[in-house]
């Protein structure tokens, strides 16, 4: 009887612990939903007045209203600050869109080689201005991943634009696309740069929201510190992986693996059946 009493006592304790843990999980989930809603509300609330400010600024800057030199300098500073705020808002909204409480993916075949070409085209001006040596290596056949087009476009854009942004003039940026040779049909994207590099200490926090390196040369560049956090969330929700190797002063290599699309699928518009 004593033994039974003991067992009953232990079972009651276990049940209580379970209840407490259950309540804690529910509380954390509620907090996460609250955080996500807060980001959305704050971003939306900030977005429209900021658009108004920037519109008026543009009007003043284009000379529709006459202003002195000093006022011009202030306008430029205000313009830059509001642009930065816009970027933070855009990134916060994007982070929420791909965060834990995001809608599930509806994956389809995506031509990653095209996304990389688009990303390079978006950075074309900086590439030209900095006289960077850019090389894209890809197999003859299209490199097709299974995923969500716009999210994977964001991944390629963020990685390529970082490589361009954090690489000094005259150096190289290479992108290599392959299929994994380990029996999986995974797509491998390697973005390598001969840029500033990232210290071992910084590498540990690289994918955390709002992390920006303390390296003074890197801080000079505009940024929100949200780009890589977004990249990581997107890659993980695609069941892919991301890894970085880097050496301060020598450069960085970001390697992404994404699930490949089945061989019969195609992401090219030209291959799509005619209506
Ligand atoms: P952002 O570039 O907007 O600051 P990211 O999340 O994309 O934000 O990157 C976080 C930080 O990681 C950057 O501020 C920069 O210090 C560092 N970083 C990212 N990519 C590179 C790179 N290719 N080379 C050197 N540093 C990088």
Image: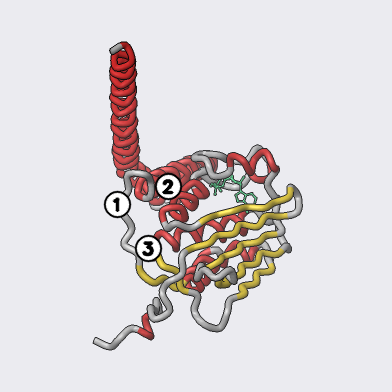
In the picture, the quarter occupied by the C terminus is bottom left
Q: Secondary structure at mark 2?
A: helix
Q: Quadrant of residue 21?
A: top left
Check whether the beta carbons of the residues at disc 1 and disc 2 lie within 8 A of each other. Answer: no
Could you tell me residue 186's position as x and y percent?
51, 67
Spatial distance from mark 1 to mark 2, Cα to Cα? Answer: 17 Å
Could you tell me residue 65's position as x and y percent?
39, 48
* Mark 2 Cβ and ligand 1 under 8 Å apart: yes
72 w.r.t. 253: above or below: above
**Taking 28 as reference, is 130 left or right?**
right
Q: Secondary structure at mark 1?
A: loop
Residue at the outermost top position: 2
Query: Which residue position holds label 2?
Result: 91
Could you tell me residue 42's position as x and y percent?
33, 36
In the picture, the quarter occupied by the N terminus is top left
Q: Nearer the viewer, residue 234 or 187?
A: 187
Q: Is residue 65 visible?
A: no
Query: Which residue position holds label 3?
Result: 148
Q: Is residue 36 visible?
A: yes
Query: Which residue position holds label 1?
Result: 103
Q: Nearer the viewer, residue 50 or 61?
A: 50
Spatial distance from mark 2 to mark 3, Cα to Cα? Answer: 18 Å
Q: Mark 2 vs mark 3: which is more N-terminal?
A: 2
């Amino acid at each position: 009887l004593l033994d039974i009493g003991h067992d009953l006592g232990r079972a009651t304790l276990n049940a209580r612990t379970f209840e407490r843990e259950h309540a804690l999980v529910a509380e954390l989930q509620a907090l996460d939903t609250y955080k996500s809603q807060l980001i959305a509300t704050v971003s939306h609330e900030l977005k429209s007045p900021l658009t108004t400010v920037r519109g008026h600024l543009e009007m003043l800057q284009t000379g529709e209203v006459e202003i002195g030199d000093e006022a011009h300098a202030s306008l430029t500073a205000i313009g830059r600050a509001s642009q930065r705020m816009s970027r933070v808002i855009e990134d916060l909204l994007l982070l929420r869109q791909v965060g834990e409480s995001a809608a599930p993916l509806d994956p389809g075949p995506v031509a990653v080689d095209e996304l990389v070409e688009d990303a390079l085209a978006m950075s074309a001006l900086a590439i030209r201005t900095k006289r960077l040596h850019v090389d894209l290596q890809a197999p003859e056949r299209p490199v097709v991943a299974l995923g969500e087009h716009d999210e994977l476009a964001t991944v390629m854009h963020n990685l390529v634009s970082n490589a361009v942004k954090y690489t000094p003039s005259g150096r190289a940026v290479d992108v290599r696309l392959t299929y994994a040779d380990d029996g999986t049909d995974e797509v491998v994207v390697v973005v390598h740069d001969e840029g500033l590099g990232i210290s071992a200490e910084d590498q540990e926090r690289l994918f955390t929201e709002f992390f920006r390196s303390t390296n003074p040369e890197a801080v000079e560049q505009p940024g929100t510190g949200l780009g890589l956090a977004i990249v990581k969330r997107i890659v993980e929700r695609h069941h892919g992986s991301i890894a970085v190797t880097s050496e301060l002063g020598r450069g960085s290599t970001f390697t992404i693996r994404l699930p490949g699309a089945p061989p019969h699928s195609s992401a090219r518009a030209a291959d799509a059946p005619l209506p």
